[in-house]
Amino acid sequence: MAHNTLALDLFLVGSGAIIFALYLLTLFYFASKKKTLTKEFNKSLGIVFFFIGLASLILTSELFFSEPIPHQYIEVYGTMLAIFSLVTLSGGVSLYVNSDLRPVSYLAGLGGIISFQSANSVLTFSLSKSPLITSVMFILAGISGLFTIILANLNNQKSRSWFSLFFSLVLIALGVICIYTSMNAVFGHVATFVAPK
């Protein structure tokens, strides 16, 4: 295979987490100035999330149908990436059409619960070259999924603003770990092809 499907998908997860964090920080800033984001900004962000989710879904489908990695890895990584794809796609559409984000948050929350089990599987069966870091990545994804439910249901503007700030820090940590893991995977993939025989 000419590309590392899992590494590309992890890059998309990391990118999505960081973009979502920047969105929350923007919300926090605007709330502190007693302003709101424009519908055009939300629509453009919805397009970005839709295409991140679509690209992730395509790559995840490749994982399931071409099986470039052993089944146990597909069970753990593929399942979580499929949930990420669906949450990101539906979140993008919801932002674009300016609809209620609570239903998407419930899907994210359920994915978050499954992510904790994925962290347990990675740590228990060493399903990574760095099981501890990968488990932390899944735990942060799980926390993010559950935080999405809280954020979507907070009605007090001040509480929502401060929670957005805290949530954005979790998302940035998740994004950095995902992108770091992705870059290392790509480097390792390249190294196997250019290593002397």
Image (cartoon, grey):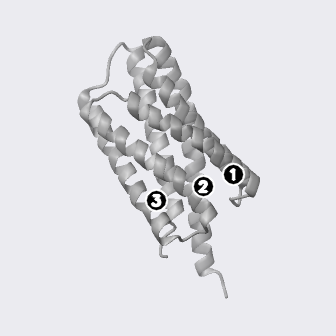
Which amino acid type corresponds to the residue marked 3 in the rendered image? Thr
How dense is the environment of label 3, judged by Cα within 10 Å: few (below 14), some, or many (20 and up)? many
Return the residue at label 2.
76
Which amino acid type corresponds to the residue marked 2 in the rendered image? Val
Which label was assigned to residue 66?
none
Up-down relation of residue 109 to residue 85 (above or below): above
SS state under label 1: helix
Which amino acid type corresponds to the residue marked 1 in the rendered image? Ser
Return the residue at label 3.
60
Q: Residue at x 66, y 47 (%)?
A: 119
Which label was assigned to residue 121?
1
Q: Residue at x 57, y 73 (%)?
A: 190
Give the number of marks. 3
Q: Position of residue 145 (x, y in %)?
A: 52, 35
| Label 2 close to label 3 by CB (< 8 Å) | no
| Label 2 close to label 1 by CB (< 8 Å) | yes
Q: Does 190 sit left or right of 40 as displayed?
A: right
